[in-house]
């Protein structure tokens, strides 16, 4: 797991960390330059040679791979003493980061690695430690010493610190500490009460139990203040001290919006886990919706981030999480399964077949829940809910929140 803490380096330590980032950025760009030169030397125009530039490299020159560039670092330190100021493993991680991006480009076929400009290299990775780097309320790093850290939550017992990543965001410093415990954590199995969660812009989420949450719209609330700060920034002379001060104010406003949104997502994810044992959501690609006319509101809600955080919280708390088919969830009746077409302006679900009436988003959540239960059902028991003993001899009033009988193959929560 990763725990993130706030760091408070002094002026000397902050300056040293910035110099290390710039050195790693130079090594990253140099390694990328070697790769691009090798690639350009192996290609030319189909009908003629290039008349603008030529990359003259030997035909048997090997591709500058990860191992070759890592082995070249000791020789480069003798020629450039600045490289020796950075811990060797941190410098090696910058080269490994480059080749990880290169391998991703080869696997995808697009996304060629780019040169990093000044200030774009914002993290340093310390891959291993001989001893525990957390000493009291300080984080001990090689060649820099102890840095004050806000340990707002302690490291769990028996966990070992594997690596530490120092991150700089909006001129604020953070430490992402990776901790590990050698145990096997099985994936949660389906059990208990199930809910379906429907996400939307009018209501941030609606569950199959009838819980509705209004969208917080953090960006829209702070947009006026952000607009004022950006207008002031546009009037400053670039690269001046006042420009840098104002740029940090804009960056910290964006950082505040991001932190507030993520905190809201975590709280909602834990609330869902408090009320249910199985959580089902739609399998949607929200990046497509973010490119439409409501793109700003979609990005402000960050449904993709919320779904990922909910999946992580469910795994951490032993709850079952799954994604179901999103086709027609808002156009289907959760009671009888009939097709009920509705425009976006219609916010109430009324089924002409069975007469079932409820909120449109709640009905969509119930359809998601029904599809999720069918998805996890055992062959031959489609639609049946398990872990119920309400009809066995000698059993009184059960405390289970599920029902044991199904209605036409589709299960739902019993009416009170």
Image: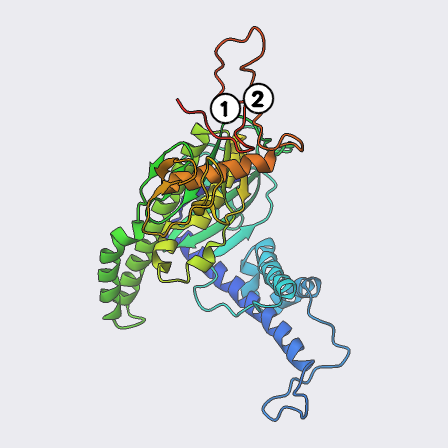
Dots 1, 2 in contact, CB < 8 A: yes
* Place of residue 325 in the rendered image (x, y in percent of width and height, measured from the top left): 54, 46
Q: How many marks?
A: 2
**Label 1 CA crowd tier, 10 Å (few <14, some 14–19, many 20+):** some
**Which mark, residue 129?**
none
- Looking at the image, can residue 303 be seen? yes
Of the residues under marks 1 and 2, which one precedes in the sequence?
Answer: 2
| Foreground residue among 405 and 20 | 405
Query: What is the residue that sits farthest to the top in this orientation?
Result: 394
**Which mark, residue 387?**
2
Query: What is the residue that sits farthest to the right in this orientation?
Result: 60
Quarter of the image where one finds residue 161: top right
Residue 78 higher or lower than 59, as above or below = above
Using the numbered discs, state the Cα–Cα distance from disc 1 to disc 2 in whole angstroms. 8 Å
**Label 2 CA crowd tier, 10 Å (few <14, some 14–19, many 20+):** few
Query: For the point 49% across and 51% down, which residue is it?
Result: 284
* Place of residue 67 in the rendered image (x, y in percent of width and height, measured from the top left): 70, 62
Secondary structure of the residue carrying tag 1 is loop
Q: Quadrant of the C terminus?
A: top left
Q: Quadrant of the N terminus?
A: top right
Quarter of the image where one finds residue 180: top right
**Which mark, residue 402?**
1
| Foreground residue among 26 and 386 | 386
Residue 371 higher or lower than 115, as above or below = above
| Foreground residue among 389 and 184 | 389
Residue 237 located left or right of residue 344: left
């Amino acid at each position: 797991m990763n725990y993130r803490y706030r760091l408070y380096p002094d002026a000397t330590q902050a300056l040293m960390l910035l110099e290390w980032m710039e050195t790693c950025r130079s090594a990253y760009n140099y390694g990328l330059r070697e790769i691009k030169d090798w690639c350009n030397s192996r290609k030319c125009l189909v009908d003629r040679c290039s008349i603008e530039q030529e990359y003259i490299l030997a035909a048997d020159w090997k591709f500058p791979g990860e191992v070759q560039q890592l082995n070249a670092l000791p020789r480069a330190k003798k020629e450039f003493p600045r490289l020796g100021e950075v811990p060797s493993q941190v410098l090696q991680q910058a080269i490994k980061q480059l080749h990880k991006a290169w391998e991703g480009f080869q696997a995808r076929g697009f996304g060629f690695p780019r040169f990093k400009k000044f200030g774009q290299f914002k993290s340093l990775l310390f891959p291993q430690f001989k001893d525990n780097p957390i000493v009291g309320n300080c984080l001990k790093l090689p060649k820099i010493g102890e840095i004050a850290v806000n340990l707002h939550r302690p490291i769990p017992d028996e966990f070992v610190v594997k690596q530490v990543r120092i991150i700089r965001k909006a001129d604020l410093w953070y430490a992402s500490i990776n901790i590990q415990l050698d145990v096997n954590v099985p994936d949660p199995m389906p059990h208990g009460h199930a809910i379906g969660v429907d996400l939307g812009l009018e209501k941030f989420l609606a569950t199959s139990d009838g819980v509705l949450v209004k969208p917080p719209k953090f960006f829209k609330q702070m947009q006026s203040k952000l607009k004022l700060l950006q207008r002031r920034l546009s009037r400053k002379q670039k690269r001046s001290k006042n420009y840098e001060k104002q740029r940090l104010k804009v960056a910290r406003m964006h950082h505040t919006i991001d932190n507030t949104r993520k905190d809201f997502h975590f709280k909602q994810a834990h609330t869902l886990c408090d009320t249910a044992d199985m959580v089902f959501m739609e399998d949607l690609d929200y990046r497509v919706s973010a490119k439409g006319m409501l793109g700003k509101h979609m990005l402000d809600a960050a449904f993709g981030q919320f779904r990922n955080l909910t999946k992580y919280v469910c795994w951490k708390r032993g709850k079952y999480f799954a994604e179901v088919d999103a086709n027609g969830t808002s156009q289907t009746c959760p009671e009888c399964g009939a097709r009920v077409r509705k425009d976006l302006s219609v916010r109430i679900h009324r089924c002409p077949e069975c007469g079932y009436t409820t909120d449109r988003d709640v009905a969509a959540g119930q359809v998601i829940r029904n599809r999720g239960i069918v998805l996890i059902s055992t062959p031959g028991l489609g639609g049946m809910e398990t872990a119920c003993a309400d009809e066995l001899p000698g059993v009184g009033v059960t405390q289970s929140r599920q029902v044991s009988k199904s209605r036409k193959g589709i299960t739902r929560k019993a009416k009170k």
